[in-house]
Image: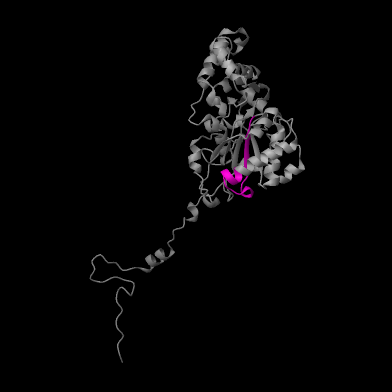
Amino acid sequence: METPAPRSPAAAGGHAVGDANARLTTPSKTRARATASTRTPLSQRAYAGLGRSEKSAVVVDIGQGSVLCGFAREARPRVEVDTPQPLRDLLAAGAKDERQDWLDVVLALFQDIYFVHLQTKPRERRVHLAVRHHAPSALLNAVAEAVLVYFGAPSLYVSSCSGLALFPFGQRSGLVVDVGALEARCLAVVEGAAVEPSFRACSLEGASVEALLRDNGCAEDSITQTVLECLLATPRQARSLVLRNVVFCGGGAQQVSDGPARLLQGLREIVSARPQYECLRHVVLEFAAVPRNAVDANGLAWLGASIGSCLDSFFARSVTLALFQDKPTLFGDGNFFWSPQLSRSRGGGGQISTGISDLSSVTTAEIATAGPNADDDNDESSGTAHVVKYTMPAPETALSTKS
């Protein structure tokens, strides 16, 4: 009977005995190599959204001069395009045009946003719309109908650029100067609530003539006058609070010469020279300041919307198709900032009108913790942003406790 030939060490899974550096392969090492994979471990995978598997929302900022669009949790918009001329004409005319005119323009705009600029599927992402304060209700209704009915987005959330501009600074109070292509708006925000009586706006259509007169000492800056009128309409207890954070935002802010520095200088000169502004002299000279801004003023509100889309309130307060069909007058004049109870922005009881009710201390640094979106093939890899929840008191209580 023949004796079988002995197996070589290599065939047995080991190494040659004479090799000084050789080691026998243990069963545990073999199993470890067999289970090794190039996939990321489940504990290290990142998902889009706070504990949700859905994708990041589409953030759109519709301005008078430009439209910014991109994805939530990113530090800057993907695309900036000029506002279509038909939409500019409608914004200049207000809500005087027919509903179908607004709908046709908005449908064409969002078709380009979805399929040309962002190249994403509308049904997979919620929408966060940032608009100017007191935007025409016809625009909001047209966007809601286009996004929810025609494109089938899961939900829509609308917020004010004046409140969103404070998000990147981690502030809840400030004086927001929103400079657009046609007009400038000034609004005081106290503890996340917009002080509606302080809202002021001025037209910028004659800005070139006004600048010529101002250089010759015949006129004063209309934006400075608007800010002073806004301060006069702000409650006395809140004036020093909002003047600590004078924020410029909007595409037209880049065209204002010297911007915040010129504004503060003009405020100090006027309150020192005119007796009707004597009540503002102390707070302006003592507290007026502009926070450091490393973000482009045109994209400031968009960045705030990108951060705000990471909050839980974004999902809780979004409007779905069923809610929009059940309440067709939801986006009435001045009623596009809502709570789960759909109360008006002028109501008390802690209902916040600027969309920043859940912000405690969120800064631009937390965008880095969220991580960029990898939108290749509509698959994203993003982290989780940590947001401290905050229960907002009623605006009247907040005003009385501040000095």
Whether residue 192 appears in magenta in the rendering, the answer is: no
Residue at image point 50% right, 55% down: 42
Q: Position of residue 3 (x, y in %)?
A: 30, 87
Magenta residues?
Answer: 113-132
Q: Position of residue 181 (x, y in %)?
A: 60, 27
Residue 156: name its quadrant. Answer: top right
Point out the image quarter for the N terminus. bottom left
Q: Position of residue 96 (x, y in %)?
A: 74, 30
Point out the image quarter for the C terminus. top right
Left-right relation of 228 to 138: left
Left-right relation of 144 to 12: right
Q: From the viewer's side, name the closer residue of 403 and 313.
A: 313
- Residue sticking out furthest to the bottom: 1
Q: How is the image coloured?
A: one colour
On screen, 72 above or below 188?
below
Q: From the viewer's side, name the closer residue of 178 and 212.
A: 212
Q: From the viewer's side, name the closer residue of 403 and 47.
A: 47
Residue 6: name its quadrant. Answer: bottom left
Q: Quick check: can you spot residue 330?
A: no
Q: Quick check: can you spot residue 222?
A: yes
Residue 27: name its quadrant. Answer: bottom left
Q: Position of residue 396 (x, y in %)?
A: 67, 25
Whether residue 115 appears in magenta in the rendering, the answer is: yes
On screen, 165 above or below 123?
above
Q: From the viewer's side, name the closer residue of 390 and 112.
A: 112
